[in-house]
Image (cartoon, rainbow, N blue to C red):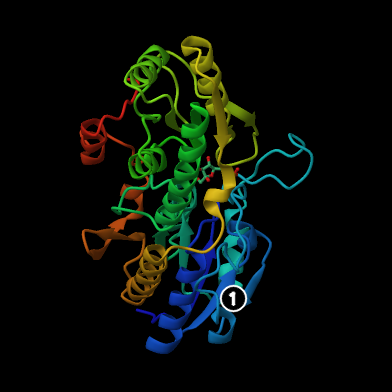
Amino acid sequence: MKNIRKLGILTGGGDCPGLNAVIRAVVHTAIRVHGLEVCGILDGYAGLIHKNVRSLGLADVSGILPRGGTILGTSNRDNPFHYSEPGPRGENEPRDVSAQALKTIEYNEIDALVTVGGDGTQAIAQRFFAKHGLPVVGVPKTIDNDLNGTDVTFGFDTALNIATTAVDKLHSTAESHHRVMVIEVMGRYAGWIALGAGLAGGGDVILVPEFPYHIEKVCDHIRGRAAGGKRFSLVVVAEGAKAEGGQMVVARQVNDASDPIRLGGIAALVANQVEDITGIESRFTILGHVQRGGSPSPFDRILASRFGFHAVEAAVNRKFGQLVGLRGSEIRTTPIEEAVAEPRRVRAEEDLVHVAKAVGTCFGA
Ligand code: F6P
């Protein structure tokens, strides 16, 4: 069996803090431990389609550990199996250009590809593996923490820190003005950031996509607090939350992205309804992409470095089609196919949910 001589690495999907730490760990482990060559594919799968590849040496990754974003660039719309040329929306019919993408792998003599990304990126990696036999190893990235095959994705801890800091800041202004402050956090169809930041920041109400809420229950809780002398409340709402029998709030629909739904705006709806029903003045804040920016937390730097190291080990040991992940305190691998089969979402029996309820948090459900 042919030994691995050259590794490729790409970062796909939405960026998140810790991507550079993975790239650095992959490059160091490949070169220093195994004497391999490494090259980076630029802008996720777009680089494979358009032959944008650069070699990566130790000097290229010097100083990048604490930097947010990705030195390789990323994209969450260039799926080689369903690719439309850039242009005005709807102009180009999507095509399967995966064979063209594979030529970039062959031309650059890449023996194995490390794909750093969330469910969309890993589902594409799995397709390349299953359909074309491309040797891939996945690394789980996303602030949403919604990927199976790992207890936690890298990027989540940093986003949680940013969201918790924001909840803390809103606390003091809510208290001074006797207002309800509604903060919308990211997370797509999973409520991990809202649950974590709500618990860490002492949110009075946490609304997550997994538990559709009743606005009356939310308002009862806020009124109850006011009756008990707490004339302010903090509501932490996940962008994907929805009322029982209602719909998620969509900011925009775009048809050429891997996920055509851009969520956003639930905080305004909740704040206005709370003000109308309770008569308590309410404001909303949408935290947005600030959750994905900036320097990774120490936890994420370490986790990303461990993932990068173990991804190279998996490739060298020819464990292809696998995703590295954290299981307890160990790094283990899981078939990518299993990891992407279902998103990891907040369950009612989650310990964090029990704890949040025990400390008086209302889920509106
Ligand atoms: O998946 C990460 C994430 O930040 C989600 O939380 C959010 O819904 C989405 O990406 C936003 O994507 P974009 O950067 O394309 O607006």
Residue 280, visible in the rendered structure:
yes
The image shows residue 255, relative to residue 84, as above or below, that is above
The quadrant in which residue 144 appears is: top left
Q: Is mark 1 within 8 Å of ligand 1?
A: no
What is the total number of numbered labels drawn onto the structure image? Answer: 1
The image shows residue 252, relative to residue 302, as above or below, that is above
Quadrant in which the C terminus appears: top left
Residue 129: % across, % down: 42, 58
Residue 350: % across, % down: 23, 38
Which kind of residue does numbered mark 1 sit on? Asn
Residue situated in front as seen by the camera: 145 or 137: 145
Residue 6: % across, % down: 49, 80
Quadrant in which the N terminus appears: bottom left
Residue situated in front as seen by the camera: 235 or 175: 175
The image shows residue 191, relative to residue 61, as above or below, that is above
Name the residue located 33 percent from the left edge and 41 percent from the top edge: 344
The image shows residue 76, relative to residue 212, as above or below, that is below
Q: Which residue is mark 1?
A: 108
Residue 185: % across, % down: 49, 39
Name the residue located 45 percent from the left edge and 82 percent from the top edge: 28
Give the left or right position of residue 107, taking residue 170 as reference: right
Name the residue located 58 percent from the left edge and 59 percent from the top edge: 44
Ligand 1 appears in which quadrant? top right
What secondary structure is found at the residue carrying circle 1?
Answer: loop
Residue 34, visible in the rendered structure:
no
Give the left or right position of residue 317, taking residue 264 as reference: left
Residue situated in front as seen by the camera: 1 or 260: 260
Q: Give the crowd class for mark 1: few <14, some 14-19, many >=20 residues within 10 Å.
A: some
Name the residue located 53 percent from the left edge and 26 percent from the top edge: 266
